[in-house]
């Protein structure tokens, strides 16, 4: 229960941050990705602001084995960089550049009642489903 | 030469929103001990394990519910979606498959991964940033859409 409430809080604040920053608007994101046009550097400031806070949080987290609510710290353990990882990143980037949506802003815009965002999110979930099917079949072989 | 779109550039609200995103990721990390990676939180619902569903749904409900809470205080800023439906479907599929193979998106790798100085996250972030820049260049300047 505590875990879910903290998750709800984090999701809500995350969404608020995306709205405040303007990143829930794909046109704004595309303005950042369009370096050959009139460039809007705002997205870099969003990342900068988030990372400023994040660096401190991870420095605190690194010294702990339990979270402040008493849960085990579950940090990523893999440092492995392979073709699959980079190709995944590239694929994501192409999709991001086409619509100006990454997963968070897509979900926030869906919550704002945008039909187009709902279509994007549905396709994104379908894409994640395709990944699951491919990986499960691979695991069977 | 890069030309800045001064009329669109919103450094202060971008920074303030970014700090809020950072606070969200920090609270998730320090309260629950987890990485706030949105694609992973969503994708994990497709192969759910027992006891691993409620918190994912709660996080996503917070994210999706943010605009509803926002409008209690003030009007939502505009959301302009220029892409047509076919483009949105292709984009969604690519983002869905890509973020799962890449083990994360802008939140998990871009914000959290870079905050913990992970080279792996840096590699993925550089990949999706580069692909994003090239894609927009191709669409806007070569195809002229």
Image: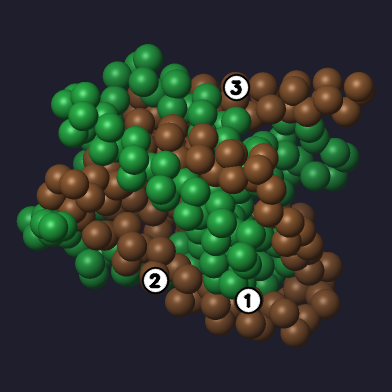
Chain colours: A brown, B green
Dot 3: few (<14), some (14–19), or many (≥20) neighbours within 10 Å? Answer: some
Given the image, what chain letter belongs to the residue carrying mark 3? A
Residue drawn at (22%, 67%), measured in percent from left and top? Answer: B11
Q: Which residue is under mark 1? A: A58
Which numbered tag is attached to residue A49?
2
Of pointers 3 and 1, the one earlier in the residue sequence: 1
Residue A55 visible in image: yes
Residue A77 falls in which quadrant of the image?
bottom right
Vertical order, A89 against A135 (above or below): below
Q: Which residue is under mark 3? A: A126
Of pointers 1 and 2, the one earlier in the residue sequence: 2
Disc 1 is placed on an element classified as helix
Given the image, what chain letter belongs to the residue carrying mark 1? A
Disc 3 is placed on an element classified as helix
- Closest to the observer: A9 or B84? B84
For residue B90, side relative to residue B60 (left or right)? left
């Amino acid at each position: 229960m505590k875990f879910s409430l903290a998750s709800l809080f984090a999701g809500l604040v995350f969404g608020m941050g995306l709205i405040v920053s303007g990143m829930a608007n794909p046109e704004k994101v595309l303005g950042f990705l369009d370096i050959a046009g009139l460039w809007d550097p705002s997205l870099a400031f969003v990342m900068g602001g988030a990372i400023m806070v994040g660096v401190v949080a991870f420095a605190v987290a690194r010294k702990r084995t339990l979270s402040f609510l008493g849960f085990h710290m579950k940090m990523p353990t893999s440092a492995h960089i392979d073709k699959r990882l980079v190709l995944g990143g590239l694929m994501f980037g192409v999709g991001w550049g086409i619509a100006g949506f990454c997963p968070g802003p897509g979900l926030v815009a869906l919550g704002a009642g945008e039909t187009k965002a709902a279509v994007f999110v549905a396709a994104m979930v379908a894409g994640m489903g395709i990944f699951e099917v491919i990986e499960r079949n691979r695991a069977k072989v | 030469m890069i030309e800045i779109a001064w009329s669109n550039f919103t450094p202060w609200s971008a920074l303030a929103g970014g700090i809020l995103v950072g606070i969200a990721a920090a609270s998730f990390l320090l309260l629950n001990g987890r990485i706030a990676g949105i694609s992973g939180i969503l994708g994990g619902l497709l192969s759910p394990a027992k006891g691993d569903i409620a918190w994912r749904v709660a996080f996503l409900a917070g994210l999706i519910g943010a605009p509803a809470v926002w409008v209690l205080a003030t009007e939502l800023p505009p959301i302009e979606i220029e892409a047509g439906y076919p483009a949105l479907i292709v984009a969604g599929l690519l983002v869905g498959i890509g973020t799962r193979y890449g083990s994360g998106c802008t939140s998990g790798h871009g914000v959290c991964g870079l905050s913990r100085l992970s080279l792996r996250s840096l590699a993925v972030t550089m990949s999706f940033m580069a692909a994003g820049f090239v894609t927009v260049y191709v669409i806007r300047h070569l195809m002229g859409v």
